[in-house]
Image: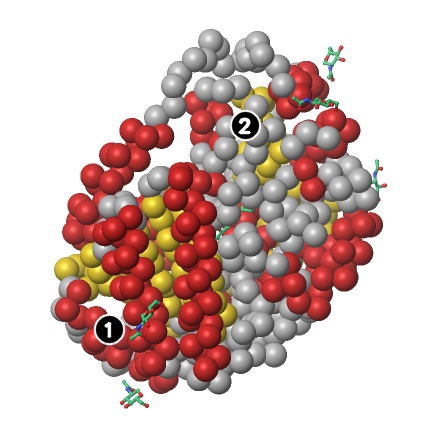
Amino acid sequence: MHSFRSFQPFNALLSGLLLAISLANAAPSLSSGVENAPRSFNNATNTCVSIANALKNSTASQVFWPLSIQYTTDTEHYMSSSSQIAACSVEPGSAQDVGTVLQIIGSSRTPFAVKGGGHASNPGFSSTTGVQISMARFSEVTLSSAQDTVDIGTGLIWDDVYASLEASGCNCNVVGGRVSGVGVAGFTLGGGYSWKSSQYGLTIDTIQAYELVLPNGTVTTVTESSNSDLFFGLRVRFNNFGIVTKFTLRTFPQTQVWGGAIVYLPTSIDDVKAATAAFFQNVTDPKAAIITEFNTLAGIPVITASLFYDAPTPPAGMFDALVAPAALSKDVSTRSFSSLVLSSPSNSTAGLRGRFHTVSLTGYSADLIDVIWNETQHWGESLGSLLETGTFISYDIEFFTSGVLSHSTTPSAYPPDRSRALLPLNLYFAWLAPTSDSFFESTIEQSAQTITDAADAEGQNIGDAPLYGNYAVDSTSLDRIYGANLPRLQSIKATYDPNSVMDLSGGWRF
Ligand SMILES: Cc1cc2nc3c(=O)[nH]c(=O)nc-3n(C[C@H](O)[C@H](O)[C@H](O)COP(=O)(O)OP(=O)(O)OC[C@H]3O[C@@H](n4cnc5c(N)ncnc54)[C@H](O)[C@@H]3O)c2cc1C
Ligand SMILES: *[C@@H]1O[C@H](CO)[C@@H](O)[C@H](O)[C@H]1NC(C)=O
Ligand SMILES: *[C@@H]1O[C@H](CO)[C@@H](O)[C@H](O)[C@H]1NC(C)=O
Ligand SMILES: *[C@@H]1O[C@H](CO)[C@@H](O)[C@H](O)[C@H]1NC(C)=O
Ligand SMILES: *[C@@H]1O[C@H](CO)[C@@H](O)[C@H](O)[C@H]1NC(C)=O
Ligand SMILES: *[C@@H]1O[C@H](CO)[C@@H](O)[C@H](O)[C@H]1NC(C)=O
Ligand SMILES: *[C@@H]1O[C@H](CO)[C@@H](O)[C@H](O)[C@H]1NC(C)=O
């Protein structure tokens, strides 16, 4: 079954919106040639020219100028608010060339950015007005001969990885992204909450090795035994210790799975709330996962769920209460893992401006689910209808079992405390007008605080709990992500980036 067809109601609402976005984002074309640098030089453009000269003999790597097709792709992001106009883009094709680029950037002190899949929800984390590095050419998926590990390039999106593993016939898979389009690099360098995390941990808990280009340009392989400091730090400090060119991930058995997406009728909300609360109360099977989404689009409620069971057939009854409520579309079946991932409507809001934020919860009571639904309605109505018609408000309730953080034998920078399972609630606001950015940023903070207070009022004690860095809004302080690990991370940083080269790019900085 082609699942995207069944999302027509959702997509129809969005199609007018997306047309508006594509018109708004259409860039004027003044390029005189792909290989020619613009005539008016700023300092970053000088650096681009130096990089182009240094890579002249490289068959692997290339520099692109505005507004070539490659430059446009290299600077593009899922959320348009995460994009900037760079002086040039560079597509390095070997780890050595990444080192050359970093050396030139470091000695010229030029602002830069590293982009994997471009799904960063914070502005400037993978975009720049300086040198945009795109990892697109790091695209290998190489299984070990024993098929127990796989080398994955940092330019890939998870869709590519799953398709390649399925084509290999290994009947194996990695612990990766849940929906279409998300990049391997940022997801993995930030933690990685997967459909398979209750069984095997976060993606960082399944890493055997990193190929890392240090800020001084040296290419190195980082494992737990070769360098426990960097291995700890890379789980998870994003782009703070250099540029990662390759991950070696453990593989796990993969059969067909059961699941897919449901778009409910708005009138099913009480049944969906009750079924979600019961799922959290009753289900302890680590093969089971759900995401219940409370959304409003232009003020109109859109309630969806994504269901997952890591076997061809789920245990009798487990998902019945979630499948039963009246729906606009139900695309739930036994299918390949990649078909399940592709069935997500995650691209529907691509191109809008956007922000994520998060609350770390120990569980979801019926009362807390009521609070979250009230937030959805309240902000959906007040922001959607009054302020902007292009507003999408989303609260994603993600189910993991209590063992989700128990799968690591060694400490990681995040989560700083694995003694209790914290479940990241994902808040996602999307809108059209750049002038609304700061308004939506402060509103999403306010809404997260309301939910935090409600959870604390029922005794969750999560007011200061660590937040997931791949969801947290950029105003979040570092100690909320890394807790007591901050001093160790600071000293690793002083050792491996003494000249603060990586501080020339955006992201979670000290
Ligand atoms: C639609 C959608 C669905 C999502 N679903 C999930 C989910 O199910 N589970 C989950 O855990 N998260 C999820 N996320 C969050 C996601 O993990 C982050 O957005 C992640 O950072 C995306 O990685 P990327 O490579 O696409 O992003 P990018 O924007 O390319 O990069 C993100 C960060 O990583 C850095 N980086 C990228 N490549 C490298 C590199 N090679 N070396 C060093 N640093 C690098 C960038 O500089 C930037 O700071 C989702 C996000 C979206 C938008
Ligand atoms: C260019 O670099 C010089 C020296 O590093 C600096 O003084 C100057 O402000 C820079 N100019 C621009 C436009 O960034
Ligand atoms: C490129 O190759 C030419 C010819 O071999 C050589 O003279 C030049 O120094 C090389 N340039 C770089 C940047 O390596
Ligand atoms: C979502 O968008 C990404 C990036 O453009 C693309 O690679 C992917 O195929 C899209 N997914 C679907 C299901 O259309
Ligand atoms: C789930 O838990 C609730 C409350 O404990 C109980 O009433 C209900 O019967 C359970 N449902 C299932 C399907 O086990
Ligand atoms: C719903 O949420 C709004 C905004 O946070 C709040 O002002 C209001 O009191 C809430 N209503 C209920 C019934 O909780
Ligand atoms: C680069 O940094 C690493 C780690 O600090 C160090 O071992 C290496 O010698 C440095 N390389 C150069 C060329 O300075």
User: In percent of the image, x 41 and y 57: which residue is there?
Assistant: 443
Residue placed at 45% from the left, 78% from the top? 455
Q: Do residues under tags 2 and 1 come within 8 Å of each other at their CB atoms?
A: no
Q: Residue at x 62, y 14 (%)?
A: 41
Q: Secondary structure at mark 2?
A: loop
Residue 319 drawn at (x, y percent):
27, 75
- Quadrant of the image occupied by residue 420: bottom right
CA distance for labels 2 and 1: 45 Å
Which mark's residue is nearer the viewer, 2 or 1? 2
How far across and down, in percent of the image, does residue 217 sit?
A: 75, 35
Looking at the image, residue 294 sits to the left or right of residue 55; the answer is left
Q: Is residue 355 above or below residue 243?
A: below
Q: What's the residue type where badge 1 is placed?
A: Val
Question: Which of the 4 image quarters holds residue 397?
Answer: bottom left
Element type at mark 1 = helix
Residue at numbered disc 1: 272
- The residue to which callout 2 is attached is 86
- Decide if residue 6 is on the left or right side of residue 150: left
Residue 486 visible: yes
Spot occupied by residue 383 in the image (x, y as percentages of width and height)? 30, 53
Residue 323 to residue 192: above or below: below
Using the rendered view, name the quadrant where residue 178 is placed: bottom left
In terms of image quarters, where does ligand 6 lie? Answer: bottom left
Q: Is residue 231 visible?
A: no
| For residue 292, side relative to residue 215 (left or right) | left
- Residue 226 at x, y percent in the picture: 78, 56
In the rendered structure, the answer to whether residue 305 lies left or right of residue 355 reads left
Query: Image height check: is 139 above or below 354?
Result: above
In the image, what residue occupies the spot 36% across and 63% down?
395
